[in-house]
Image (cartoon, rainbow, N blue to C red):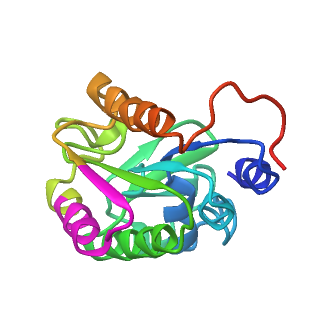
Amino acid sequence: GRAMEALIEQRRFVAVFDLALQEVANQVMGSVVNAGPTRLEAAGRRGIPQIVAPGATDMIDLQTWAPMPKDYQGRPYHAHNRLLASVTNTPAERRAVARHIAARLAAATGPTAFLLPLRGIQAWDREGEALHDPPGLAALIDEFRRRIQPPVQMQELDLHINDPGFVAAALGVFDGWVAEGRIPRGRSGPAS
């Protein structure tokens, strides 16, 4: 995340697909696994078109090898590997994350699309998986519906973020912006 923000700041991209904002959720929740307080700011500040989704914002990353913080004990848990694990955010925490993301997007000076998948936002939140939490997802969706306002284009998708149709929707926004001239064609090298 820090590297991506730095490259965006240098105008190395003509558009940004920012579909996994777990580092933003981690920052809001105080996790040490984050990309710093300026994550999700550079594209908006630079006016670079951005397509954003709330991928993996429903969990908090922890160090697998460290003791479980008291506040997180008893929450649904998934160990990704020997270094990184996640617990789910509460519905109230998910609302706080959604407000933070919406505020970042509201400050954007360039075209911004927010894709909201209604059936889940990460691999372990599907039915039968360790982090499946329908009330938590409902709270996150509700808060995004309340907070995302024009000129940010919000598109609700009756899909899971890992469904092929989600990718098609994201590419559809990109292709539309290219056709409209919001994203330049055939450009190479860093932008000035």
* Near-viewer residue (84 or 190): 190
Location of residue 132 in the rendering, given as x and y in whole percent from the top left corner: 23, 46
Tell me which corner region of the image, top left, top right, bottom left or bottom right, holds residue 13.
top right
> Which residue: 62% across, 53% down?
48
* Near-viewer residue (57 or 142): 142
Q: Which residues are magenta?
A: 138-155
Q: Is residue 9 left or right of residue 30?
A: right
> Which residue: 37% across, 69% down?
98
> Which residue: 78% across, 43% down?
12
Q: Is residue 179 above or below residue 31?
A: above
> Which residue: 39% across, 35% down?
170
Tell me which corner region of the image, top left, top right, bottom left or bottom right, holds residue 35.
bottom right
Tell me, yes or no, whether the highlighted magenta stretch contains residue 152: yes
Q: Is residue 120 above or below residue 44?
A: above
Q: Is residue 135 left or right of residue 39?
A: left
Location of residue 86 in the rendering, given as x and y in whole percent from the top left corner: 46, 52
Q: Is residue 135 above or below residue 37?
A: above
* Near-viewer residue (187 or 50): 187
Tell me, yes or no, whether the highlighted magenta stretch contains residue 167: no
Tell me which corner region of the image, top left, top right, bottom left or bottom right, holds residue 160.
top left
**Total marks drawn?**
0
Q: Is residue 85 above or below residue 184?
A: below
Location of residue 102 in the rendering, given as x and y in whole percent from the top left corner: 41, 70
